[in-house]
Image (spheres, coloured by chain):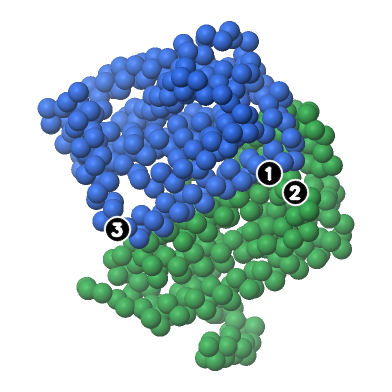
Chain colours: A blue, B green
Amino acid sequence: MDTIKLYLRSMKMLMRCQMEYPRSFLLNTLSQIIMQGGELFAVMLLIDRFQRIGQWQGKHILFFFGMMTITFYLVECFGRGISNFSPVVQSGALDTMLLRPRGILTQVCCYAVDPRRLGCIAIGIAALCTGSRACQIVWTLPKALLLLESIAGGFLLITALFMIEAVTCMHSVKSIEMVNVFTYGGRSTCQYPIDIYPGPLKIMFTVIAPFALTLHVPAAYILDMQILNLPGWAAFVTPLSGLVSFLIMYTVFQRSLKHYRSTGS
Amino acid sequence: MMNLCIRFLRPLSPHSLLRRLKPYFSVFMMRFRIETQYRGAALGGIITQVFFGLMLIALYTTLYQSAPQTVPLAQTVTYVWLQQSCFRMLLSTDSELMQTVRTGGMAYEMCRPLSPYGFYYTRAMAQKLVGSTLRAVPMLLIAFLLPAPWGISLPAGVWQLGMFLLALFMGLLCTCAMSNIAMAFTIRSLDNSGITSAMNLLLVTFCGNLLPLTLFPDKWQKFIRLTPYAQLLDAPIRIYTGEYTFMQSIETIGIQVFWTCALIALGYFMWHRNQKHMIVQGG
């Protein structure tokens, strides 16, 4: 509880810091809206040309796109310390954190926030709402709760994937671009439902980085569609894979902290 | 403005032209050497970019199964590979520039007996050329070795290959002109994230990186290839895949030349204006 209070407090402080430059904040947020809007624009042109992908129609794709965008940029916004870890190591901030009587992960999360990403989240929400309207989803309480569970699971999963990069950072100082395949690659791949891809990609994003389990299975349930031949109740269980991934990476993170040697700056 | 024109129109003998271009060539070579040092970083980039290529091809293959298109799948696959492998040509930021502006190093830049525009233009060119070549050559090799539905096709013909390389070079000149315009904004506003990044982001969408321009709505095709963004990679790729006849290819290169000249003129004018209004603070 104390940790959450601490986190919220630092978020508030960091946000206020950023708001000291309102013009820069507005321009940056606007440019993020243009960026994510461009992605949405491309997806809409694609839908316009091809009408359907496998069993999915355009309206479904918008829903998937919205869910992925919201989840991914929530991490980029509120977990900025983790998703951009290499400056924490390079600047020696991690050394300072090791001296303080608090969990390292908490401190890393409290280290940075990126409010510009709120622009991207807004685009995600717009896509999700448009998709849900077009599909005429009847929102019931279980469905709404499932959406929240799914986004929470996705949040933990993406955080866990960024932690892989953080761990490699502790060993090699510079971040390794290859890990992007899971994070940014996962985002681009899994903004479309997983069942349109061939085997290897399916396995990669179901078993190794379970985007399909945390986001797609619940989304399919909400849309009253079938995916991966899973029964309906499974949708409520699979988002937990995000939590599992997070716990695994949490242990790895704590272990590699023991091997961390300062950069000496 | 008058002054500017006169400087452009000053008569040049071939010898003095060469002598005046020599320092820029040295800047280019220097930057070239610095950039080739980062071969390790290129490797990580290649793997990521190949992954993105494969993922997009998987996506388009599924899409084509549900709705066959007039643009053949093989052509779209080739488009994706060429875009992914030359990605570095489009976006690259000169991180030193911001520092030069912040620290007041710009004052030194002004002291050089060179045009600052030309100086930064050549630097950008070396950076983009090396950055993209280091990635493109191995990536295209991989793309050629991949089996049929996944791999890149050979150019449509011999003259297409020649024209493609020429158009690609024009694209390089054009993208450098664009990044110099972005730099001019950066120098003025001291903020490299606002307008500059908005410009870059439009670029990713309208140069065909997110979605091949050939797959944009058919009604748009006529004018979408006239935009400056389409001159960077879209124009060369369309020549490569044999979409254009010989005359159309010549016309395309003509459009590229037009935009390159226009953007260089605009950028040069902006830098010139910046130079006049520059205030160097502190010491």
Residue B173 location, quadrant = bottom right
x, y percent for residue B108: 34, 74
Residue B30, placed above or below residue A175: below
Which quadrant of the figure contains the C terminus of chain A?
top left
User: Where does the N terminus of chain A fall, quadrant-wise?
Assistant: top left
The residue carrying mark 2 is B217
Residue under the point 45% across and 31% down: A71
Residue A32: x %, y % from top left: 46, 49
Write down the chain letter for disc 3: A
- Residue A251 horizontal/vertical position (percent): 30, 17
Residue at mark 1 to residue at mark 3: CA–CA distance: 36 Å
Quadrant of residue B100 within the rendered picture: bottom left
Amino acid type, residue under disc 3 in the picture: Tyr
Q: Is residue A105 left or right of residue A79?
A: left
Q: Is residue B55 visible?
A: no
Answer yes or no: do the residues labelled 2 and 1 have beta carbons within 8 Å?
yes
Is disc 3 on the same chain as disc 2? Answer: no
Q: Residue at x 16, y 36 (%)?
A: A96
Residue at 52%, 24% (x, y): give it: A139
**First along the sequence among labels 1 and 3:** 3
Label 3 crowd (10 A; few <14 / some 14-19 / many >=20): few
Confirm or deny contact between disc 1 and disc 3 (CB under 8 A).
no
- Which residue carries the number 3 mark? A21
Looking at the rendered structure, the kind of residue marked 2 is Pro
* Crowding near the residue tagged with mark 2, few <14, some 14–19, many ≥20 C-alpha atoms within 10 Å: few
Location of mark 1 (residue): A45
- Residue B156 percent coordinates (x, y): 84, 47
- Marks 2 and 3, Cα distance to the nearest angstrom? 40 Å
Decide: is B282 above or below A57. Answer: below
